[in-house]
Amino acid sequence: MKRKTLLLLTICVTMAATVLAQTNRVSGGITAGANYSYLHSSDNASGYNYDWKWKFGPAGGIYLNIPFGNTVSIQPGLLYSQMGSRYDVTDNTGTYKWIQTLGYLSVPVPLKINAGNSFAFLLGPQLDFLVGARLKDANDNKTKNENQFKQFDFALTGGIQIMPNSPVSLTVRGMYGLNNLMETSSSAYSQSFAVGKLHNSGAQATLNFRIFGGKQKAVAVTTPEVPAVLDSDGDGIPDDQDKCPNTAGVAKYNGCPVPDTDNDGINDDEDKCPTVAGVAKYNGCPVPDTDNDGINDDNDKCPTVPGVERYQGCPIPDSDNDGVNDEEDNCPHLAGTAANHGCPEIDASTQSKVDMMAKGISWSSSTGYKLSATSNKSLDQIANMLKADSNLKVTVSAHTANTGDADKNKTLSQNRADAVKDYLVSKGVMESQIEAKGYGGEQPIGDNKTAAGRAKNQRVEVKLHY
């Protein structure tokens, strides 16, 4: 029965190959290669240990390729395929090496999906009909044992084919049998085999030699000769009409590229300022300077008000809003007048009162630079004025006549100015509000030749300012 089935299958495949070969696109040929196969078992009998190993075996036959389009086809085949496995059996007497060979007439029917000219994917079923089996024991004794296995196996196969459209291609695919190979009626052999279930698995590599088909038949067609049209730059404009035949361009400019008159990288068709270099953000125009202060709007924090670069395009600030900018204002946080360099003007009557107070400053005769008690009233009034306005400042200038040693006179005047400053600080005035200067006899206001002039030069001046 088995031989009749195989004969019928062979006749059917041969007839199909003959009929399909008449069409232009169906192709076919012969294939030859090798299997690397392996039998794997799901269980071992008690007392046995099986170590299953891979073995090589030949494979070869014929194949067809039946396309359903430019990408998908079916590639059935009829192959002799030798499967099986090497295995080591270990029991209580030792370890023995055996080889089980299974010969199949295999009919793979995979779906083939081309992925370009380099390779294709294969995936589908495979029908395997057992045509022979042989067991080689550890002593090289060979025994036919096909009756111990099922005569049919159903497997899944998948892999890739390299150079699938070439006359010679390479197929690498794997096979996995879904059926249990053991014939359940052969209980004696199953027990000697010491396994309950066996399944085929393997990998196959074959070279495929196309013998027929694969290309459309060429049909000779006579066409009138058409003069060749040259288009050297491939821009669709013939060279005889192209003013820039070696540079791709557009018809609007007679085959030349769209010009960029200002060389800013933005062609004139998209450039709103085609004669002035600009940037893409402003459609080919320069970055604007709305307030014309020389700083473009992208870098100008005050784009609508003229300013200067050191203030990032904004005007020089006027913190106290007195009309004198901070860079020229000696009192940038206190409103003043331009005449007084941005500081408030000191009222003349107020300064006059302070001048009268300064005339009340006197010194003890013992040191010449220690304040006498009579000075306290005047200095307390000055201290109160300074504490009432923390922005107000005072310059204390001490002067002497020109009699005696000039250096000593200058030291004496500095000691007197410092004494006034120390007193004011002791009364709660901030030190930063007071400047003390000793000038000795360098700035006389009277005639040093007379006693009255010299007395006039011996003075302390207290000047208010901001």
Image: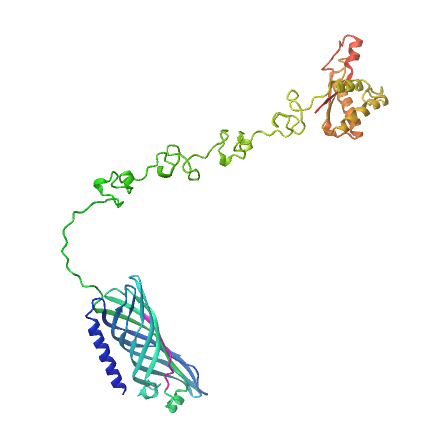
Which residue is situated farthest in the top direction here? 450
Q: Nearer the viewer, residue 215 or 360?
A: 215
Q: Which residues, given as a range, are shown in magenta?
A: 172-182
**Viewer-proximal residue among 214 and 204:** 214
Residue 380 magenta:
no
Residue shown at 40%/89% (left/top)? 191
Quadrant where the C terminus sits is: top right
Report x, y in % for residue 402.
75, 13
Q: Is 344 placed above or below 444 here?
A: below
Q: Position of residue 421 (x, y in %)?
A: 77, 26
Asked where in the image residue 156 lies, by quadrant, the reply is bottom left
The quarter holding residue 239 reads: top left
Q: Residue 408's x, y, as percent?
A: 76, 18
Is 240 positioned to the left or the right of 444 in the image? left
Look at 40% across and 37% down and name the residue there.
Answer: 284
Q: Measured from the top left, where is residue 45 in percent x and y?
A: 44, 87
Task: Name which quarter of the figure residue 459 lies in.
Answer: top right
In this view, the residue in front, 160 or 453, is 160
Query: With respect to residue 165, does 141 lie above or below?
Result: below
